[in-house]
Image: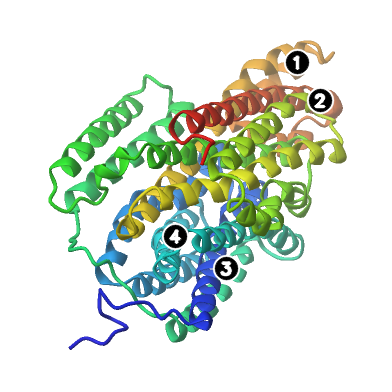
Amino acid sequence: MPSPASSPSAPPDTGNRHITATIVLACLGVFVSYLPVVGVSVALPVMQQALDASTEGLQWITDAFILPTAALLLTCGMVGDLYGRKKTYLAGLALFCLGCLVCLTAGSVVQVCVGQALTGVGTAALLPSTLALIGHVIPDPRKRARAIALWTAALGLGLTLGPVVNGVIVAHASWRWIFLPSLVLAVVTAVIGAVVLTDSRSDRERHLDIPGQLLAVVAITGLVYGVIEGGSAGWSSAQVVIAFVAAALGAVGFVLVELRSACPMLDMRLFKSSAFSGAALVMAVTLFAQVGLVFALSEYFGLVHHASTLDIGIRLIAINGFTVVLGPLVGRLMNRATPGLLLVTGLVIGGIGALLMNAFQADTGTGEAALVIGVLGIGIALAMAPITTIAMDALPHRFGGTAAAANSALRQIGSALGPAVFGVILTHRTLATLPGHLAASGLSPADQGQVSGLVSNVGIQAGAFLHLKTPASTGQAQAAYGASFTDALHTCALVGGIGMLVAAVIAVALIGIRP
């Protein structure tokens, strides 16, 4: 007879000590997995120079982590339900450690991408398993809402501390060492989790959905690949058209397979709940705007303000820092006000914060920028925990693992598209507006051609060393480049801000703001 710890139907140990330990380890798991997300983004300017990477290469360094996370989340949620959430949690930490080791020894963009991909697979296992572990030990919705708020705060803490810690490391050592803190924390968390956690499984009969998984990978990878390559190779190029066609066919095939499957990876019945569907859409749009704006702002501070990696991390603290500071308060507020009302309020505030970035100029001061970024951060802090709580509470408790995986999958799809789309916007808008700013700069036609040619050949990363290539006209060239890049940032701000406001409308329509 199987032991209670391993039995699919075994009741959870409801002792307060065990519940607390499970919540702490779930928070540690998501904290570790999110340390590299923004932390690697702020180190991109340094990595670009060290590895001679193009803008497209930098986007792939970011998306190499996010793509496998998004593509494998649903399968990892099913694996956890089938074989045990604790086992999936520990396997995720092991893969995460392996990815960090690969990045620690990287000498090329390709190797960094391989390491990032491995950490992404590990994160795909960690996100649904951590939420499912919490859901298993805390079936009560009110108590679970507070635990999820702590989980969200831990996620935000990883996003907040990653840039600062990496900034300190890059200032004193090679960029490769930015992966060491994540490696050490993952090892420690795995050792503690192996001893403390109790395993759990779904009480529903499930099996792996291989056709669904393959089609999901085709759809997600084709979409993100098409967006990234479209910005460099052209939207009508053969590989981009093929990528988008593959993405469309993969998405349609995925839906058809899941509808007919006896045990689908993503049960389409979940979307019969308007609250769950609304939370899924809002999650994707919000993370698209959040991660995309972090990518754009990191490039803006690095290439226009020439800020160090540490300075960039400090300037971006407010975007995710308020999620940590306000996390416990948001958890309590969700028991007093409706999660839908908090969600809509947060999306509106965040959308306004993003739109205020249109006031940024090439010489905008740190204080002014911090205030605007703070408004965006407060909005995100108010929105993130309610989105997750709404998605988890919209379905019966037995769907907890599937709901957690679907919620996290939409989170990662939005996160993957953010840097891809915003990277394309930054490149195209900078190149489109640069000739006009160069013409108004007072540079000679020869110097204008030199600067324009450099940016066209290298991409927006040319801003990092423009002063080395045009020493005779450094000030004028950098001013023209800075003005062009800021124009591109304004377009990103419009896309992100309008996206969050549209998400607020979706939330009102599908979720509502009343109890």
- Residue 47 image point, x, y percent: 62, 51
Residue placed most toward the observer, 315 or 2: 2
Secondary structure under tag 1 reads: helix
Q: CB under 8 Å between callouts 2 and 4?
A: no
Above or below residue 490? Residue 132 is below
Decide: few, some or many residues near mark 4? Use Cα within 10 Å; few <14, some 14-19, many ≥20: many
| Residue 451 seen in the current view | yes
Q: Give the CA separation, mark 4 to mark 3.
A: 16 Å
- Residue 158 image point, x, y percent: 61, 60
| Labels 2 and 3: the sequence-earlier one | 3
Q: CB under 8 Å between callouts 3 and 1?
A: no
| Labels 4 and 3: the sequence-earlier one | 4
Residue at image point 25% right, 42% down: 268
Q: Give the CA separation, mark 2 to mark 4.
A: 43 Å
Q: Is residue 55 left or right of residue 377?
A: left
Decide: few, some or many residues near mark 2? Use Cα within 10 Å; few <14, some 14-19, many ≥20: some
Residue at image point 69% right, 44% down: 377
Q: Which residue is mark 4?
A: 127
Above or below residue 85? Residue 314 is above
Secondary structure under tag 4 reads: helix
In the rendering, which numbered label is found on residue 479?
2
Q: Which residue is mark 1?
A: 437
Q: CB under 8 Å between callouts 1 and 4?
A: no
Q: CB under 8 Å between callouts 1 and 2?
A: yes
Decide: few, some or many residues near mark 1? Use Cα within 10 Å; few <14, some 14-19, many ≥20: some
| Labels 3 and 1: the sequence-earlier one | 3
Q: Which residue is mark 3?
A: 182
Residue 126, image quadrant: bottom left
Q: Quadrant of the N terminus?
A: bottom left
Q: Give the CA separation, mark 1 to mark 4.
A: 45 Å
Q: Amino acid at mark 4?
A: Leu
